[in-house]
Amino acid sequence: MSGYAQHPLLLATAIAHGVLSLGHTAKGLDQFKHPSLNTLPTALRGAIKAGWYEGSVFFAIVGILNYKWSQTGVVGLADKAIASLLTTLLVGAGSYYYKTGDKGTASTLAIVAILQGLGARNASI
């Protein structure tokens, strides 16, 4: 099975998470230019930036995990729990972005949530 995606929705989800990682990083770099960020205490400003980059790396890790699942399927309770939590996180974050006016990010996360949920369901073993 090496290198062959038996679960193409999860392969698409892996790619989507890679794109999310890059987009998340780019959006952060743009938002870090906002002058109001410099009015925050140094520790808070540092936590915001570190957390943003952690989010970007998280999306990359999840992309790799989905790539693995595209080859192996979503096997066992731990994989199913992780896939469920990922879908829930994407829906929740997307809802928050929507409520705060960032409909583009909300739509993107909704699409990835659908891919994640359907891909995991179809690949559950």
Image (tube, rainbow, N blue to C red):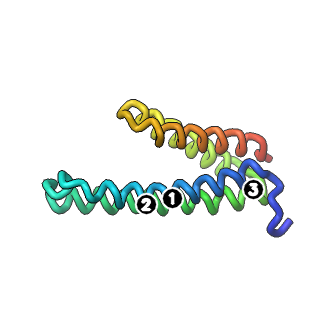
Q: Residues within 10 Å of mark 1 (few under 14, many from 20)?
A: many
The spot of residue 19 in percent (x, y) is: 56, 57
User: At x 80% / y 47%, what residue is drawn?
Assistant: 125
Q: Residues within 10 Å of mark 3 (few under 14, many from 20)?
A: many
Horizontal side of 26 relative to 38 (left or right) equals right
Task: Give the residue pinned by disc 1.
Answer: 21
Instruction: Say which mark, if any, is on residue 43.
Output: none
Q: Tag 1's secondary structure?
A: helix
In contact (CB < 8 Å): disc 1 and disc 2: yes
- The quadrant the N terminus occupies is bottom right
Q: Amino acid at mark 1?
A: Ser
User: At x 56% / y 62%, what residue is drawn?
Assistant: 61
Horizontal side of 41 relative to 103 (left or right) equals left
Q: CA distance from mark 1 to mark 3?
A: 19 Å
The spot of residue 102 in percent (x, y) is: 40, 38
Q: Amino acid at mark 2?
A: Thr
The spot of residue 22 in percent (x, y) is: 50, 60
Q: CA distance from mark 1 to mark 2?
A: 6 Å
User: At x 33% / y 62%, what residue is drawn?
Assistant: 50
Q: Residues within 10 Å of mark 2 (few under 14, many from 20)?
A: some
Task: Give the residue pinned by disc 2.
Answer: 25
Query: Which of labels 1 and 3 is toward the front?
Result: 1
Q: Earlier in the sequence, mark 2 or mark 3?
A: 2
Q: Nearer the viewer, residue 25 or 66?
A: 25
Q: Amino acid at mark 3?
A: Ser
The image shows residue 27, relative to residue 113, as above or below, that is below
Task: Give the residue pinned by disc 3.
Answer: 70
Query: Which of labels 2 and 3 is toward the front?
Result: 2
